Image (cartoon, coloured by chain):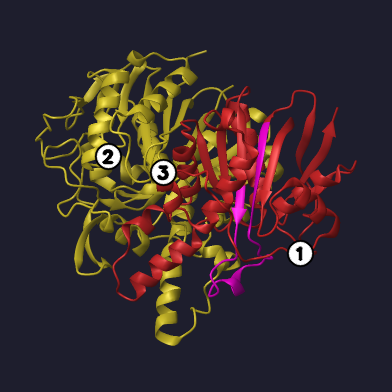
Chain colours: A yellow, B red
Amino acid sequence: MPARLAAMGLVNALGRGTDAVWPRLASGDASGLVRRGDLVADRSLLVGAVASELPRIPERLRHYDCRNNAFTLAALDEIAEPVATALATHGPERLGVVMGTSTSGSAECEAAMLHEAATGVLAPAFRYSQLEFGGTAGFVAELLGLRGPALTLSTACSSSARALASARSLLRLGLCDAVIAGGSDSLCGLTTNGFSSLQAVSDAGCNPMSANRSGLTLGEGAAVFLMTRENGGIQLLGIGESSEAHHMSAPDPEGGGAIASMRGALHDAGLEPRDVRYLNLHGTATPLNDAMESRAVAAVLGGEVPCSSTKPLVGHTLGAAGATELAFCWLVLDRREGNELRLPPHVFDGMRDPEIARLRLAEKAERIHAPAPAALMTNSFGFGGNNCTLLIGEDEPC
Amino acid sequence: MLTRIEDWAAWSPGRETRDDWRAWARTREPLGDDGQPAVAFLPPAVRRRSTRLTKMMLRAAFDCCGEALRSDVRTVFASRHGAIHVAVKILESIVSGQPVSPMQFSHSVHNAQAGLYSIAAGNCEASSSLAGEADTFCSAWIEALLHLERAPDARVLLVIGDEPVPPKLSPLVDEPSASYAVALLLCSGGDAGVGFALEPGEPPEAHAPRAWPQALEFVRWLCADGPGALVLGAKRRYVFSPPSQ
């Protein structure tokens, strides 16, 4: 059964909207990263912060007002027309929403607690629905008047990849005729201090697959898709999922979970490794992730598939990363130039780590010959050992 | 869309066995809030890292799912509030200028229970963790159905649990609090099992706030073995129909 990714909207450090993001993504423009001194005490942190102007949360939805939901709203604005058409065609009972997040409104809770520290009471305007994870999908449902299922998945850095998996199953089970699926995450004290405490954040900026890599760069943003049961266009072709049974905050160094996840997606799509024309790596630039992931990619796809991590451009958007990186793959297909695809380059210092499996890293301004239909893959690996790999591609011509 | 409940278990302070829950279903006495379950079955490394919520959820999970199946099931872990106590502690550290504990941060993720279950049970299968505001149980039931769509021959272990939120946030939460965990072992029912539908119409809890967490209303319904449907929902109308034979 088809699962068409009929429309997509996004916002991140590269900008707001597909037309703003695509040229900077394709050219590997890392200038969206900025230094911030307000996130972690005594530390200036390079982050992929969203600088674009954000829409205001409508007054009637004030109880959901948070930066996280403002990102979602900005991304939804871009697909407002096809979403309205889907609503008019199928009715609100038949539209669902699945969102992924790891932060929801943690930043607003922190602000409310700062107010408490100063005055003795939480900021009076603060609402629990700004903070709770479930509010991420609840906001979308209430905003659009959707009456179908509204689920928020939160499995750390694989949250929004999983949201796409659940969305397809909602269509296949017949619980929905169209689903809004994606993810949203915002920079906040909890994640920036948390990853700093794990010594996982790089001072110099993330440098994936380099011998000099020293940790991740955090980011923020949202990406949302309208998924329908139509043929044609760009389709979600395959889903792979696995758990690691290994460690809460470190992957299995052998890459067993990542291998299972990638093989699962290929099996689900009925594709062979040679059918994958590009892989968007999880590529966090922590020493462990890149060693593990390159080993797993070499084992499953071999060393010839062009790969890149786009985290040097937008940072690691955590709960939004799966949807954001799927959105980047979607853009590669959507902006096809005849038989050629432009790939997001792998931006790093060029000093490959000789100790890890050698991957074919996408070059600046690289175009590959890949006539339609082409299939692209993206990996998301999360804390708690939660992995999800997605495969998307163009529909076969009828 | 019928789903068979192969087994179930629930834990709340003072209520551990199915007999305890059958008795509760009749009397509906208030639940206790103090105490935590014995978790000697957990590997020491997992036990040391477990919060009270984790212990409650893993206890229900292990009581429900026998050893032979523990590493084979897909899992759905659901909680409205999740690791809110850990998150608030971290935010208190930040607000007061204290360093954040890396261990606390690793366990503040919403899928902490799922990750620890995976480690304790040696389970490498697909797993999701979710929240759905006041309709978290019904959302978890849907997510379990979605796993059965992707893997029709699989079993899904659905585990849901919550506890009262930290005092500073409790005035902001719009449903009664309780410390509990419920686990259900689910599989596709073919032509027998519990039916489920999302119906148009008024959510039953829109004007009559519930007395118990949704998951415990479901347990009460299971214990009652009655012929009637169970209608739940604060924002939607979720209808569970009794197992057909």
Q: Nearer the viewer, residue A145 or B69?
A: B69
Estimate the x, y position of residue A110 in percent, counting from the top left: 41, 70
Eyeballing the image, is A123 above or below A351?
A: below
The residue marked by circle 2 belongs to what chain?
A
> In x, y percent, where is residue A256?
35, 27
Contact, mark 3 vs mark 2 (Cβ under 8 Å):
no
Residue assigned mark 3: A384
Kindly give the residue lying farthest to the right in the view shown: B227
Residue shown at 61% from the left, 37% from the top: B157
Kind of residue at badge 1: Pro
Part of the protein shown in magenta = B160-186
Q: Secondary structure at mark 1?
A: loop
Foreground of the two, A325 or B63: B63
* Position of residue A279 in the picture relative to residue B54 (left or right): left
Q: Quadrant of residue B149?
A: top right
Q: CA distance from mark 1 to mark 2?
A: 47 Å
- In the image, B107 versus A285, the foreground residue is B107
Determine the residue located farthest toward the left in the rendered image.
Answer: A351
Looking at this view, name the residue that lies furthest to the front.
Answer: B40
Give the number of marks.
3
Helix, strand or loop at disc 2?
Answer: loop
What amino acid is found at the position of numbered circle 2 in the picture? Thr
Q: Which chain is indicated by disc 1?
A: B
Residue linked to disc 2: A310
Does the magenta run of residues contain B161? yes
User: In the displayed structure, does residue A270 sit left or right of residue B220?
Assistant: left
Label disc, if present, on residue B209 of the rendered structure: 1
- Pointer 3 chain: A
Give how far across and how far down residue A173 sits, in percent.
Answer: 66, 30
